[in-house]
Amino acid sequence: MQIGPVDLGRFPLLLAPMEDVSDPPFRALCKRYGADMVYTEFISSGGLVYGAEDSVMKLDIRANERPVGIQIFGGDVEQVKQATAIVDRAEPDVIDINFGCPVRKVVCKEAGAGILRNLPKMETITRTVVAMATRPVTVKTRLGWDDNSIDIVNVARMLEDCGIQALAVHARTRKQMYTGTARWPYLRDIRKNGLRNIPLIGNGDALAPPAILRMFEETGVDGVMIGRGAIGNPWIFQRTKEFLETGEIPPAPSWQERIGVVGEHLTMKCDWLGESRGVKEMRRMYGGYFKGFRNASQLRARLMKCFTRQQVLEVLESTLTPERTVVGPTPGRHPTQSARPTPARWAQAARYPE
């Protein structure tokens, strides 16, 4: 699979752009564990044009993340045009347009999935971004606004005619949000009857290695974009690749490795955001990391009461001490841990290049 000059090889796995999730620390972890390409959180075009601190900060990409795409959204054509120039100067490998976000505060501005009710405007924005950018432009969208408006095959053709170089489709409508089942047959239809010369990236319910293999086999997509399946689970890329190569699902990470990565993730968050904000924002990640483990709720409750990085690391380390263990793997589901890391080792390992 190729996006312009970016060669992603066969059966590439991409980290989806997710608000409050796919920031530089998490992208670095996903790249370490095998993601072929990662995307930033979505960035407001208006925020970039007006210099909003949070929006500008999301342009921060690192050498160890490449290839990386920066995703923008907006319903104002002129703002999107200006924002494209700003993003272009940040030198991502790809500029992605968000035509799929379903949240109300976005769609009410005729941005994200809201633009699926105004396809002429979708075409105008896409052509504007392609004309402004000096690097490949891609799009991520959904099947349609609701079941009565699904026209994704023709939309895919229109977007390709606008000059995009890859299309990612979440196989749900906006009305579905994240409920129900992703409708993969539409992906197969897009691949067979829609796109002619550019890659199709499938998204939706790619939550585990067997499901990802089924998406490749059943739909013919060129790549799979993993979103919710990666939250608290950066190993999904590595484990899926091994499964695709061998047909065997490798063991899940040991409790020791899991706790060590949580510590690294926290340290990178604090390096990037500052300690206070980093500790607070890391709280939303614990549910994913500890899902399926005994007494996980007690561990999360303890971590929620921590206000410094050192306090969090001490709680994490305590779970590796046999006489103080408050949480452990569900029997038969995870391998046992070996020698434990220390907070100092986590902090040192977590440093990542500018």
Image (cartoon, rainbow, N blue to C red):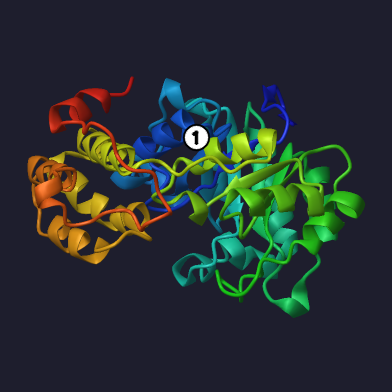
In the image, taking residue 223 as reference, residue 336 lies left or right, namely left
The residue labelled by disc 1 is: 87
Kind of residue indicated by mark 1: Val
Tell me the quarter of the image containing the C terminus. Answer: top left
The residue located at (26%, 61%) in the rendering is: 296
Residue 29 percent across, percent down from the top left: 40, 34
Residue 307 percent across, percent down from the top left: 8, 51
Tell me the quarter of the image containing the N terminus. Answer: top right
Q: Report the number of numbered marks.
A: 1
Report whether residue 303 is seen: yes
The residue located at (38%, 32%) in the rendering is: 60
**Splitting the image into 4 quarters, where does residue 292 fall?**
bottom left
Residue 4 percent across, percent down from the top left: 72, 27
Report whether residue 125 is seen: no
| Residue 264 drawn above or below residue 102 | above
In the image, taking residue 215 as reference, residue 271 lies left or right, namely left
The residue located at (71%, 46%) in the rendering is: 167
Query: Foreground: 153 or 340?
Result: 340
| Residue 30 drawn above or below residue 152 | above
Query: Foreground: 32 or 278?
Result: 32
Tag 1, which secondary structure? helix
Label 1: few (<14), some or many (≥20) within 10 Å? many
Residue 352 percent across, percent down from the top left: 31, 23
| Residue 31 drawn above or below residue 315 | above
Which residue is farthest right? 193
The residue located at (52%, 46%) in the rendering is: 72
